[in-house]
Image: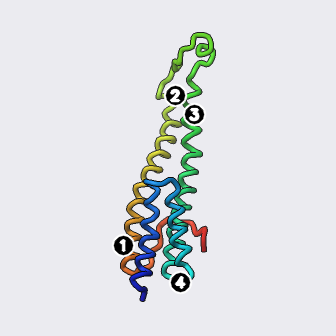
Amino acid sequence: METTTERNTATFTHLSALSQYIIPFGNYIFPILIWTSGKDKSEFVNHHGKETLNFQLSLLLYSLVLAIIAIPILVFTIFKNIPFQKLIHHHDFVFNDFTFGDNIGIITIGLVCVFIFFGLKIAEFFLIINASIKASNGEKYKYPLTIPFIK
């Protein structure tokens, strides 16, 4: 049975990932600091620290893949429809013959990536809260769709 200190440390390891909303990269820095301070003292803290970091790294990977898909689509759609010759001579920034019908497929893919990203962020928030509650109750928790980078 885990002590109250171990449960609190594991809980704060999960909750520290929410610091990303205040401090850039806080979702990596603070869990690493808390995990490394307690991983040798408790297997329970070690498990939750690894889970937290693996989950955050997995989300980073998923977000990068979505960005690699969505950003080029956005850039391609915009620059495909700008007449650069007119822009140079007349200094007007006008889209030339832009129709959604011609670009609907590629725009849909980009929008789906954006919606998946926001869905991941919402799911991340609630999964962190759920993992914190489980750790607080002394239960081991495993995040869904997590790649085990740290074993």
For badge 4, the amino acid type reads Lys
For badge 3, the amino acid type reads Val
In the rendered image, which residue does mark 4 sit on? 41
Residue name at image x 50 percent, y 59 percent? 26
Q: CA distance from mark 1 to mark 3?
A: 42 Å
Neighbours of disc 1 within 10 Å: few (<14), some (14-19), many (20+): some
In the rendered image, which residue does mark 3 sit on? 75
Viewer-proximal residue among 122 and 116 = 122
Task: Find residue 32 and report its horizontal and vertical position in percent.
Answer: 55, 68
Task: Find residue 45 and report its horizontal and vertical position in percent.
Answer: 49, 78
In the rendered image, which residue does mark 2 sit on? 102
Number of the front mark, 1 or 2: 1
Q: Secondary structure at mark 2?
A: helix
Task: Find residue 43 and report its horizontal and vertical position in percent.
Answer: 52, 83
Q: Which mark, residue 2?
A: none
In the rendered image, which residue does mark 1 sit on? 133
Residue name at image x 50 percent, y 65 percent? 30
Q: Earlier in the sequence, mark 2 or mark 4?
A: 4
Q: CA distance from mark 2 to mark 3?
A: 15 Å
Tell me: 26 left or right of 3.
right
Q: Earlier in the sequence, mark 2 or mark 3?
A: 3
